[in-house]
Image: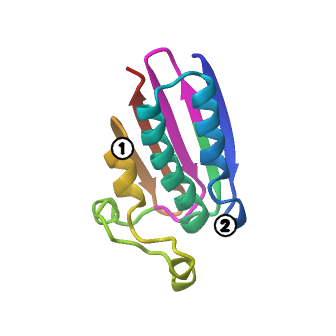
Amino acid sequence: MRYKLILDVKRGDFDAAGEASRKIKDILQQLGVSSKVIRKVSIAGYEGEMNLAIHSLGGKIILEVGEEELSLTIKDIGPGIDNLDLAMTAGWSTADDKVRQMGFGAGMGLFNMNKHADNFLITSKIGAGTKIVMKFSLE
């Protein structure tokens, strides 16, 4: 492994929204990762970061960069997702009106993460939380 970073994301901390994604982008640029991969990881990472702030009780984003691929893991403490199939549908969201008025919670988070990752795996347990592992080829 070339690099590993663990970032904490707090529930409802919209003032810091995007900071974790920005750090990941900066690190990937320093490591010489292609702009195409950085774009995909940045989109997926931001969506994951916002989901942590909006829907969970907080969590972590873990970036691991290897020689041929990188992984982005989003782990939360939270309510879990009741219906994963529905949650993966573009436009479906459980965000409240306050979050929507701020311009977040449009229901594209999981959809966009899956769309931009080369490999996407989500597991969720009601009352325990959700874990998303996304992998991106560096080639």
Give the numbered dot on residue 116.
Answer: 1
Q: CA distance from mark 2 to mark 1?
A: 23 Å
- In terms of secondary structure, what is the magenta stretch mainly? strand
Residue 67 location in percent, x, y? Answer: 49, 14
Residue that mark 2 sits on: 14
Characterize the local packing of mark 2: few (<14), some (14-19) or many (20 or more) Cα atoms within 10 angstroms. some
Query: Which residue occupies 71% across, 65% down?
Result: 15
Q: Amino acid at mark 2?
A: Phe
Q: Nearer the viewer, residue 85 or 36?
A: 36
Tell how many labels. Answer: 2
**Camera-side residue: 54 or 125?**
54
For the residue labelled by badge 1, is the local secondary structure a helix, a strand or a loop?
A: helix
What segment carries the magenta color? 63-80
Question: Residue at position x 28%, y 64% from top?
Answer: 89
Q: Quadrant of residue 29?
A: top right
Percent position of residue 103, x then y = 52, 74
- The three-letter code of the residue at mark 1 reads His
> Looking at the image, which residue sits at the far front?
35
Mark 2 and mark 1 lie on one chain; the one further toward the N terminus is: 2
